[in-house]
Image (cartoon, helix red, strand yellow):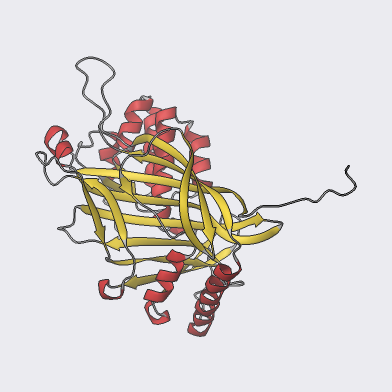
């Protein structure tokens, strides 16, 4: 996507409250450098970053460098965290991509074939297990003013956190039970299928012919990943999205839920040596008439130890959703309500019980 060179000027000066500018990682860095030179406040910088989207992935390496160089305040640091999470759905800057030739078609077909096989194998060998799903939620819903006569702030912010124990049996998530909850999560996109169902749907809905070579990309661990793009039309889709809740107008007293089975597209990140899936992204293709204008998910996979053995399981994820908000439109001139959920999967252990027999006890 071509980025207009005056975007960075908008960031530094008067970004309209209703605008959402798209910038590159390099433009983000220049903005932070300029803001530091002009001694802008932490809140002012954070407010401008809240109305920005990244067209490139802000990788962990780049984020660490930017934080070290700019020494952001707490509000700015939170905005950078949100930007980095949402940008997982984008490709990294071209300067961060490895200079490796595109593999020939035979090699591409081989990588896809072993990826399909590995995905099925991973599901079959996965033991029944329990894990902790930790979700941090961020949104741009109006935050009440601290001072009298002060206008409420409309910016992305931390909204809540939940921790839920989930059970997986025969490769499928079979239910959740809240084990600890520090704050109730607001409405938003419900994620599902990280433990295999999502991979199964993508591979079932898309053929090798519909998967196109995209690029090589280096993982955080240094592995060179083969990235393929895919696209599934609505007629072939078995992907379902659920969103709650929205209102059709400011006078509408009803909280509506949205459920659809749209077409979708995304990327699959594959270790070419093993066929293991390192990451998947999924962007729903919604129509202009839908109340939800954006629904996108990324899931990161990694090796975890369960019962003394290593298994490939989800370790993190991001869900981004946007919808029309009539109240925000009328009161603040901002029509888009935005949610970003960061998910981490931890505390893996086998589902079951153990027993010990003691002998020789009177």
Q: Is residue 25 above or below residue 272?
A: above
Left or right for 69, reference 262: right
Left or right for 92, reference 329: right
Q: Is residue 353 above or below residue 285?
A: above
Percent x, y for residue 333? 15, 37
Q: Give residue 352's quadrant in the image.
A: bottom right
Check the picture and name the quadrant holding the C terminus. top right
Identify the residue at the far right of this view.
360
Percent x, y for residue 228? 44, 70
Left or right for 270, reference 252: right
Q: Nearer the viewer, residue 3 or 45?
A: 45
Q: Is residue 295 above or below residue 113?
A: above
Q: Nearer the viewer, residue 37 or 198?
A: 198
Percent x, y for residue 340? 36, 45
Check the picture and name the quadrant holding the N terminus. bottom left
Q: Is residue 277 visible?
A: yes
Q: Is residue 252 above or below residue 124?
A: above
Identify the residue at the far bottom of this view.
106
Q: Residue at x 36, y 35 (%)?
A: 159
Q: Give residue 110's quadrant in the image.
A: bottom right
Q: Residue at x 45, y 67 (%)?
A: 199
Q: Give residue 75's quadrant in the image.
A: top left
Percent x, y for residue 196? 49, 65
Q: Is residue 6 visible?
A: no
Q: Residue at x 40, y 80 (%)?
A: 207
């Amino acid at each position: 996507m071509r980025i207009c060179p005056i975007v960075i000027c908008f960031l530094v000066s008067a970004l309209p409250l209703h605008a959402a500018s798209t910038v590159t990682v390099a433009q983000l860095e220049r903005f932070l450098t300029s803001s530091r030179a002009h001694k802008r406040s932490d809140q002012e910088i954070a407010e401008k970053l809240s109305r920005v989207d990244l067209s490139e992935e802000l990788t962990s390496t780049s984020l660490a460098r930017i934080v070290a160089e700019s020494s952001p305040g707490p509000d700015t640091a939170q905005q950078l965290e949100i930007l980095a999470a949402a940008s997982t759905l984008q490709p990294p800057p071209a300067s961060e991509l490895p200079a490796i030739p595109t593999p020939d078609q035979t090699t591409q077909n081989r990588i896809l074939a072993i990826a399909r096989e590995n995905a099925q194998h991973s599901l079959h060998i996965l033991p029944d297990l329990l894990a902790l799903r930790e979700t941090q939620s961020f949104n741009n819903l109006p935050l009440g003013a601290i001072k009298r006569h002060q206008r409420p702030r409309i910016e992305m912010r931390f909204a809540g956190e939940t921790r839920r124990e989930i059970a997986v049996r025969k490769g499928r998530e079979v239910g959740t039970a809240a084990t600890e909850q520090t704050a109730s999560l607001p409405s938003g996109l419900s994620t599902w299928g990280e433990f295999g169902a999502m991979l199964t749907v993508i591979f079932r809905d898309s053929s090798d012919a519909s998967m196109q070579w995209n690029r090589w990309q280096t993982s955080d661990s240094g592995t060179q990943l083969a990235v393929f793009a895919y696209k599934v039309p609505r007629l072939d889709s078995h992907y379902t999205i659920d969103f709650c809740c929205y209102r059709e107008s400011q006078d509408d007293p009803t909280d509506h839920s949205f459920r659809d089975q749209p077409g979708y597209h995304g990327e699959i990140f594959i270790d070419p040596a093993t066929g293991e899936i390192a990451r998947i992204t999924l962007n729903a293709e919604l129509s202009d008439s839908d109340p939800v204008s954006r629904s996108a998910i990324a899931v990161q996979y990694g090796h975890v130890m369960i019962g003394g053995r290593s298994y490939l399981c989800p370790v993190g994820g991001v869900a981004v959703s946007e919808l029309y908000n009539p109240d925000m439109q009328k009161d603040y001139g901002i029509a888009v309500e935005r949610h970003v959920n960061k998910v981490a999967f931890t505390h893996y252990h086998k589902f079951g019980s153990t027993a010990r027999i003691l002998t020789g006890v009177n």
